Amino acid sequence: MGLLTKDEYKAIAAGLDLPTAAFIDGAYRPAASGKTFESVNPANGEKLADIAACGAEDVDFAVLKAREAFDDGRWSRLHPGERKDVLIRLAKLMTRNARELAVMESLDSGKTIYDCETVDIPETIHVIKWHAELIDKIYDQVSPASDDHIAMVVREPVGVVGLVLPWNFPLLMLAWKIGPALAAGCSVVVKPAAETTLTALRLAELAMEAGLPRGVLNVVPGGGAEVGEPLGRHMDVDAISFTGSTVTGKKFLGYSAESNAKEVTLEMGGKNPAIVMDDAENLDRVAAHVVNGAFWNMGENCSASSRLIVHKAVKADLLKRIGHHARQWNVGDPLDPETRMGALVSKAHFDKVCGYLDKAENIVLGGKAENGFVEATVVEVPGNDHQLAREEIFGPVL
């Protein structure tokens, strides 16, 4: 499926019916408090929608319905082949609605429509299909034993799982979490990032259309303190998976220890180096990889290669080539398919990245930042003890 024009994407955006309520027990529901928060398009600052601002009461209700669904076996004890069929239908519905999901993701996050159409949505669908096909192909084991003994390895769903998402890959990270959880037979309560809630809510609706039983997939939007912490501390949540900052990830270990010792899976930040020695055979290819690693998704990527350690003998030549490749990463309207770098996800995050740029003493390339957009930037620092070399900037800064 080829890319559309900017005007065609704008037309799709204008016609979207954006979801605004929590999705609990198979239906959209307002927050118990009636409160809402604004979802804002980071590319232009315009309000997209007022989203239900959930709290602990909504978390309790979602966990209750997820537990009921798990305990009565409507999903957890469904035949593996039937669970596979539901997830395959979900993947097909996502394929049918791929363009809508791509535009919604771009509007909500500032990501380029190019990346949404060519990477995020196709990979999201692939992840759901992959785990669907795995469901009836994981075999339990009987270990060797004597005639009057039997020893078995049996894989069972852990129960109710809390899934806390980041804002940098909203749909793809959702798929990485619900794919294995639903395939195993768990019920889930999803907390999307407050900055990017729309596509998680829409996918929950598609899952119901695909035949997922009510209560199995619940989406509770809201802030970290209001939704994330109650989910992490909930006594009836058996496991939790968090992707986000290291500071917040550590908190979930504490929440688990202070509640029911639930299983915790963490994916947190990084400050990853690319190391180039003087025997590198093709510096142009190296430069292309370095630039892609540093600036893809506006650098909002925990596996971004945001540091470059280079041998002094090839430094000048490599930097020249990096400059050439970086110029191809133009900044602009995320809904323009020619744009390679869109807006940072929020004004707060834009201000954070700008704060790091203010501390840069030697900007080699780029450095321009305005109205939520930051161009591809290369900063030279005196050593690895410099703040910019040690802290995760999470922006297009190498």
Image: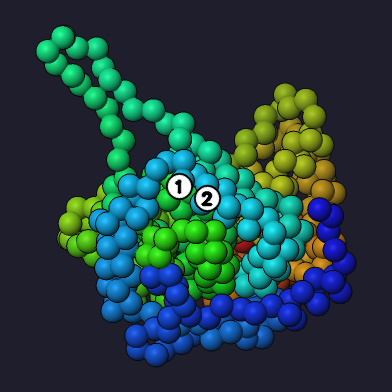
The image's mark for residue 87 is 2
* Rendered view: 275 above or below 14: above
Proximity of marks 2 and 1: CB atoms separated by less than 8 Å: yes
Rendering coords of residue 279 (x, y %): 72, 24
Question: What is the C-alpha distance between the residues marked 2 and 1?
Answer: 6 Å
Q: Nearer the viewer, residue 358 or 28?
A: 28
Label 1 sits on what residue type? Arg
Label 2 sits on what residue type? Leu
Residue at numbered disc 1: 83
Residue under the image location 71 percent in, 81 percent down: 44
Horizontal side, residue 287 vs residue 161: left or right: right
Horizontal side, residue 79 vs residue 211: left or right: left
Q: Nearer the viewer, residue 271 or 235?
A: 235
Residue under the image location 73 percent in, 63 percent down: 99
Rendering coords of residue 311 (x, y %): 67, 34
Determine if residue 383 is in view: no
Residue farthest bottom in this picture: 34
- Total number of numbered labels? 2
